[in-house]
Amino acid sequence: MSVDGSAHAPRRMPTMRDVAEQASVSPMTVSRVLHEDPRVSSTTRDRVLAAVDALGYRRNEVARNLRLGSKSGLIGLVVTNLANPFYSQFALGVEAIAGANGLRVVLTNTDEDPERERVLVEELSARRIDGMIVVPSGADHSHLDPLAPGGVPVVLGARPPSGLPLDCVLVDDFGGARSATAALLAGGHTRVGFLGLPPSVWTSSERFRGFCVALEEAGVRLESRYVRVSQRTIPAAEEAARALLSLRRPPTALFCANSRNTLGAFRAMSQVAPSTALAGFDDFELADVLGVPLIVAAYDPRELGRTAMELLLRRMSDEDPPLEPRRIVVPATVVHYGG
């Protein structure tokens, strides 16, 4: 509101055309002045610069860099699900290192759609970004080839490359799931359920593999009726957990492949079988105040983001001969909450 109580609409950013009108010249003349064209007279230059100051006009440096073929100072970050808290923390890690190096991050979301990912990657490349960090949603990574026309340096996060020599930073999905499941089994449980994402998701398949190996090492047979692998949301996980806990011989413990499945399982347990033991992959806020014993395979998503950005800076250094691709695995540590 203004001093006299009237409302004002948000101020529109001035354009080059606005500057041209203010200075009574053409937009092309404004452009020539801003690009320090010596053919523009000093009188016209002074008039245009006065209009720039009066209007508070700022050049679109990204567009300017694109025209000049210069670096944009932008990094693309492509993730699969912004609703997942993991990705906000991952992005903060990327941004911390990017910002410290004078770069800005453009964040996009694929919603686990490989075709949408392909389109977003093409659009980012068309903007001549300096590099890209991608959490791939499918198994075909051909559109990420940095040697293709228009290609840029690429680092993969959370999932490894397929058919391309790309840098990547991963979580120890297998080892973390194996250790957390082993902790459940050490408590005497022989009927253990699994809640996870579809096996086509690399992280889910690795965590399921760790779960299975832990069962095998403890001499416990895997029962397919205790496995549910299609839950992407907390309500879906709650419904799947409720179905498992309502079986005639329900599992006495549940291992959940990510935090959304853990929270869904907790909701179902609190209503159906509160004595069920619970373990999950991914730490999350307030995990320590749920009021039940909880085992978590924990790691630092920001560390993943920081490491991914450091790998990208290394890849953007244009070393000759090309650097060998690196694969860095961040460990997962088993944490016990509650009683």
Image (tube, rainbow, N blue to C red):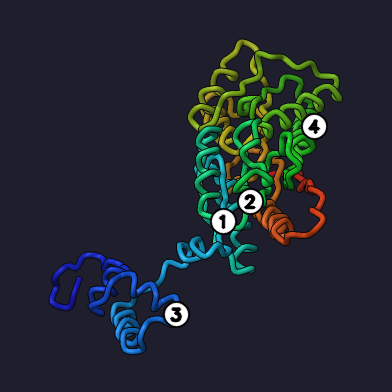
What's the distance in space between the residues labelled 1 and 3, CA to CA?
Answer: 25 Å
Q: Is residue 286 visible?
A: no
Q: Residue at x 81, y 26 (%)?
A: 213
Mark positioned earlier in the residue sequence (1 or 4) = 1
Question: Tag on residue 36?
Answer: 3
Q: Which residue is mark 4?
A: 182
- In this image, 245 relative to 36: left or right? right
- In this image, 70 relative to 16: left or right? right
Up the image or down, 101 lies above or below 48; here it is above
At numbered mark 2, what does the secondary structure look like: helix, strand or loop? loop
Give how far across and how far down residue 221 sits, in percent: 79, 16
What's the distance in space between the residues labelled 3 and 4, CA to CA?
Answer: 68 Å
Give how far across and how far down residue 69 sits, in percent: 55, 62
Mark positioned earlier in the residue sequence (1 or 3) = 3
Location of residue 93 (image quadrant)? bottom right
Mark positioned earlier in the residue sequence (2 or 1) = 1
Mark positioned earlier in the residue sequence (2 or 3) = 3
Of circles 1 and 4, which is in front?
1
- In this image, 82 relative to 138: left or right? left
Mark 1 belongs to which amino acid?
Ile
Q: Which residue is mark 2?
A: 152
